[in-house]
Amino acid sequence: EGRREGGMGSKAEVKYQENLVNKFKKNKEDTQKLVFDLQKLQMQLNENAMVERELGLLESDAKVYKMMGAVLVPQDLEEARSNVKKRLEFIRSEESRVKQRITKLQEEETKLREEIIAFQAKKQQQQQQQQ
């Protein structure tokens, strides 16, 4: 009889454990996607910082062009500098937001891992008591 009761409870336990594991996997996938996004942002940050440095070296009368589709279009130097500065601010803001999200997901992952370990330890203890 004890086994039958354990069997009934174990369905709910299995469901609970599957739910934990699925949350853990989803968390991992979300974290990996954000890490990839962060790497792209950091590449954009480096590229734009390099452009900013290059624009800073130019004399005020230098001719600057920007690519629009397949065409090079003249652009005012100060406008170009301003655009790059705004782009850098935006990228840094996004980078900060993504880093915060990654940290939050890593904290959730740690809690889920601890919950899974605690659940498995409890389950083992119950199995040992039944023997």
Image: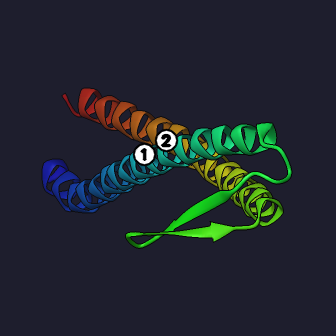
Q: Is residue 28 left or right of residue 17?
A: right
Label 1 CA crowd tier, 10 Å (few <14, some 14–19, many 20+): few
Q: Do callouts 2 and 1 mark residues in contact (Cβ within 8 Å)?
A: yes
Q: Is residue 119 left or right of residue 47?
A: left
Crowdedness of circle 2 by 10 Å Cα count: few (<14), some, many (20+)?
few
The residue tagged 1 is: 36
Cα distance between the residues tagged 2 and 1: 5 Å
- Amino acid under disc 2: Gln
Residue visible at 34% across and 35% down?
120
User: Where does residue 33 sit, x and y in percent of width and height?
Assistant: 40, 51
Q: Secondary structure under badge 2?
A: helix
Pick the residue in front: 13 or 38.
38
Is residue 18 positioned above or below 127 on the image?
Answer: below
Frontmost residue, 17 versus 48: 48
Residue located beneath label 2 in the image: 39
The amino acid at mark 1 is Phe
Q: Residue at x 40, y 45 (%)?
A: 32
Give 25 or 31, whichever is nearer the viewer: 31
Taking the spot 64% from the left edge, 45% from the top edge, the residue there is: 99
Q: Position of residue 26 (x, y in %)?
A: 36, 55
Q: Residue 11 or 31: which is nearer the viewer? A: 31
Q: Quadrant of residue 79?
A: bottom right
Q: Secondary structure at mark 1?
A: helix
